[in-house]
Amino acid sequence: MPYTAAHQHPPLVSSETLLGSLEAARELNINLDSILLEHSIDPALLHSPSGYLRHSQATRFLQLVAERFNCDHFGFLVGMHQPPLQLGAVGRAMRMSPTFGVAIETGLHYSHSFTEGTKYDLTVTQGMARLARWHRRSYPFGSTQMRMLGIVQTFKILNHLSGTEWRPSLITYTFSEPGNSKQISNYFSCPVLFDQEIDSLCFPERDLSRPMAESNSDLLKLVEQQLDLYLSKTRPEREIFERVRLYIRAHLGMQRCTMEGCAMFLHLSSRTLQRELERHGTSFRQLLLHVRMEIARQYLSDSSIKLAALAALLGYRNQSAFSRSFRLEHGVSPKQWRVTAKL
């Protein structure tokens, strides 16, 4: 019988969202242990994030830290200290897009695969583009810190994508001006307005036409096929086996591409997921290998992607690890298989 969700589950967010919290706490000379305990957040996630947290859980944590330690810019500091979020296949599709604008639109189209708690919208008016960000749900507590963090994360993603020191022209926030607003405007290198109607990043419309350094139409087509398959088949009524396979395809190369991360995403316990996969005569590890090899064969036959890049895409530590795994599975090296496939 297909698995059916019994009720609407709360939105999730990658545990990477809290990366930077320890560095922010050190900068403020505060200790987060008690608040982490209150919110049932494993402190290890602040060092090595894996899996997911409830969006409300992460939002409340950030807000409580700000309130308890009288730091009305904690979310900003967390974002400032964290690396750009991992976006997996979505990030690859964005980087392979022809222009900055297409990259953004691609990210918006597939954004639910890296966050369920927020939504985005891109509009263009009178020569200015605005990328707006909203929370999908309201909470009985404040969300200022998560909104502050979200704009910093979005800025870092766009900056990382552009491959240059890209800067917006204007940042707008819906909440009141915090005490460190000058530090925030200095960080973005542009004016920051508060008490506005929307949280957003604004920049010249001409930026949308900027070419992407890693643009690759052939690889983009392959990644979009992979993501479109994920979009069309991840409905809750489908068999868990199929949903796990699709989860792996969309999250290869990301820290949450694990059985534990997948179980959280499907709102199951790891044990339940393991039993379901055993019922199909397989395991998460076996499915991971199967999907990796399936995608590897597709890229080797349909593109000229370099083996080192393919290894990273598939989540291997290096090219040698990928080649060993491929040879064990197929009896030949990836390079030999590619030559044969193109004959």
Image: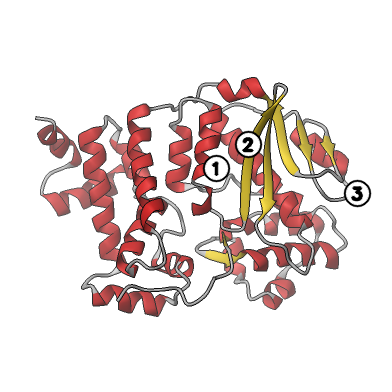
- Residue 116 vs 41, above or below: the answer is above
Q: Is residue 276 left or right of residue 335?
A: right
Residue at 49 percent of width and 53 percent of height: 113
* Residue 209 in picture, x, y percent from top left: 56, 21
* Residue 207 in picture, x, y percent from top left: 62, 23
Q: CA distance from mark 1 to mark 2?
A: 8 Å
- Contact, CB < 8 Å: mark 1 with mark 2? yes
Q: Is residue 325 left or right of residue 91?
A: left
Residue kind at label 1, given as amino acid type: Leu
* Residue 272 in picture, x, y percent from top left: 38, 79
| Residue corresponding to mark 3 | 179
| Residue corresponding to mark 2 | 122
Res 108 label: 1
Q: CA distance from mark 3 to mark 2?
A: 29 Å
Residue 318 visible in this rendered orientation of the protein: no
Q: Label 1 neighbourhood size at 10 Å, few (<14), some (14-19), many (20+)?
A: some
User: Where the C terminus falls, by quadrant?
Assistant: top left
Q: Is residue 121 left or right of residue 306?
A: right
Residue kind at label 3, given as amino acid type: Gly
